[in-house]
Amino acid sequence: MKKWSFSTSAIHAGETGEKIEGAVTLPIFQSSTYLYEGQSSYGELKYLRLNNTPNHISLCRKIAALEEGEAAIVTASGMAAVSDSLMAVLQQGDHMLAQNCIYGGSRDLLSREFPRHGIEVDFVESLARKDLEAGMQANTRALLVESITNPLMQIDDLVQAAEFAREKGIVCLIDNTFPSPFNFQPLKIGYDMVIHSCSKYLNGHTDLVAGAVIGSREMIEKVNHRNIHFGATLDPHTCFLLNRGIKTLPLRMRQHNSNAAALAEFFARHPKIARVHYPGLPGSGVNARTRKLFNGFGGMLSIELKGGKKENEGLIRGLQIPANAPSLGGVESLITIPARTSHAGLSPEERKSTGISDNLVRISVGIEGVEDLLEDFEQALQQIG
Ligand SMILES: *Cc1c(COP(=O)(O)O)cnc(C)c1O
């Protein structure tokens, strides 16, 4: 059969051919266990924690199709996807490299938990060859990067990082939460595993927490074993909600892309804004080879106001539409100060080394009418000093 377009896959990929009781939408299979049908091994039994109920199977196929991977698994959170995938490739005595500016929770996992299990981690300044080369040790087994780093929205040389990993024979993992597969598909340029916090764009409605890992059948089998043993599996109701959310991913992403691009341009021209961080803006430093791989630059941007804490707080107070809340990727706009939320777990020194100033404001641009968002930011900016 002809390969489906992304939008068709988002709706139909993975759905069961047979319509159960005529139901057009796959119902929720709220059953923890299933009849014994002569299976000879534990892994073949159907049980909720084994990730093999109809809701899991259908959802995993859909997510694999969107990232154009062989297989996928879903997990109880994005952090479970990060930890399961890394634990699938690392063991005691191993060393791994990670990009410096990764998600605060992942950074904490790597710097605070992994050493307790005999896994060493070094953070690299950039994905430039010289920095990666300098970080390599005889026992380096994996490299973890993020497609768009948070909260400065930088896109490093993702093509070069994958080539480097391939050349050195280390497993290359990428957290693709920010672009979503609509904007960027890392497996196509040689990444071994793609990780998502589905709590963000894939679901898109700010009403659940879930994760996913996509890769070769062999890799995903290993990740699934970790997930079954550590126990962070997704319940069928959440599978159903996530499956439903994904169906509108292409529509939502188009709107996130265009709303955020319009706001970034507005901020770049605004006299009260000192800096705008958005990878779609000219001069954002994304190299041409990597830029070409992106369909759009997503809904995340950050700004630095002229002034400081007082101005930031004034802006947040003056806004009517964006809610002051952490997390991202939903239909509604959210605004936060990373030093106090997503990156509060880092010490002031760690924040400084990753370039996160205390007055940085991060915006998850939703899919509201762009004219309303522009007007809201304009009136809130006018109110401050
Ligand atoms: C939110 C997030 C995570 C963690 O996901 P949870 O679903 O909150 O566990 C991991 N990586 C990135 C880039 C994120 O934004």
Image: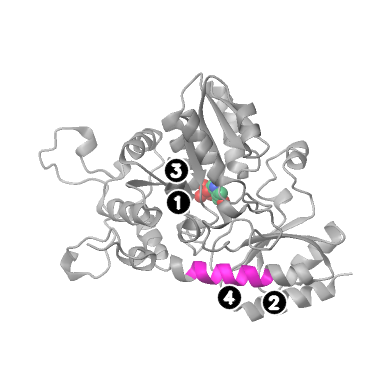
Count residues near mark 1 (Cα–Cα under 10 Å), then give few for <14, some for 14-19, many for 20+. Answer: many
Is residue 330 shown left or right of residue 152? left
**Residue drawn at 51 percent across, 50 percent down:** 176
Q: Is disc 2 surrounded by few (<14), some (14 to 19) or many (20+) residues within 10 Å?
A: some
Q: Secondary structure at mark 1?
A: loop
Query: Does mark 1 have its CB less than 8 Å from ligand 1?
Result: yes
Precedes in sequence: disc 1 or disc 2: 1
Which numbered disc, 2 or 4, marks the residue that appears first in the sequence? 4
Residue type at mark 1: give it: Ala
| Spatial CA span between label 1 and label 2 | 31 Å
Chain-order first, disc 4 or disc 3:
3
Name, please, the residue furthest toward the right.
385
> In the drawing, does residue 94 fall left or right of residue 157?
left
Name the quadrant of the N terminus.
bottom left
Q: Quadrant of residue 96?
A: top right
Rendered view: 143 above or below 176 = above
Whether 173 is drawn above or below 90: the answer is below
- Closer to viewer: mark 1 or mark 2: 2
| 221 lies left or right of 377 | left
Residue at image mark 3? 190
Residue under numbered circle 1: 210
The amino acid on which the numbered mark 2 sits, given as a three-letter code, is Leu
